[in-house]
Image (tube, rainbow, N blue to C red):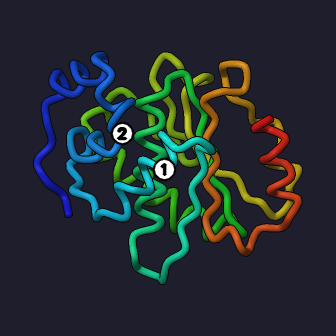
Amino acid sequence: MPEKRMSKEEVVERLVAGLYIKNPELLAKDAFGYDLDPWQKRGIRKLFLGPKKKLSVVACHGSGKSFLSGLIVNMFLVLFSPSIACITGPTGKQTRAQVWSYVSRVHDRGIFAEDFEWYRTKLAMRGHEEETFATWVSSKNPKTIEGFHGPLEGENLLWVCEEAKGCEDGVFESISGAMS
């Protein structure tokens, strides 16, 4: 449920102090106004702070998985700049309708919305459009997702796979290549 956000100045102060690197789940409420469920907070902590920096969520429809993905993409761009977030799924239609629509909704209510430019297939930081952005790509052809690498020697690259079970093995091979 949406909650009251902090001011941008307060969040930036906490960001500079490193609070969100140690407690990333706090950024969800402070900058975007969302009070998360405990499982969503644990997922964010596992992804951002866990030793493998990976997260897989298995849950029923309507549980908040796609929302969490959209929130994580927005948080990632704020916390790790320069950074690239790529979103894929079995079809472009599904990716757009699910995760990408949540990326848009979360972005619109965030205190950093004015710092980013929204395009049909890309969300980019103003003035840093080529080094800090999120984009969605279809995984129908695994070769279309190759070529994305983190802007800092392979670091600061996030991949989100919506309905991963529907993606071909070649998609994960391409992602593994980008993450090495």
Sequence order check, earlier mark of 1 and 2: 2
**Residue at numbered disc 1:** 46
Given residues 136 and 9, the one toward you in this image is 9
User: Mark 1 or 2, which is nearer the eye?
Assistant: 1
Q: Amino acid at mark 2?
A: Pro
175 lies left or right of 85:
right
The image position of residue 172, as x and y in percent, is: 80, 56
Residue 8 in which image quadrant: top left
Given residues 158 and 89, the one toward you in this image is 158
Residue count near mark 2 (Cα–Cα under 10 Å), binned few <14, some 14–19, many ≥20: many
175 lies left or right of 81:
right
Question: Secondary structure beneath disc 2?
Answer: loop
Question: Residue at (26%, 45%) from the top-left corner?
Answer: 32
**Residue at numbered disc 2:** 24
Q: Amino acid at mark 1?
A: Lys
State which quarter of the image contains the N terminus. Answer: bottom left
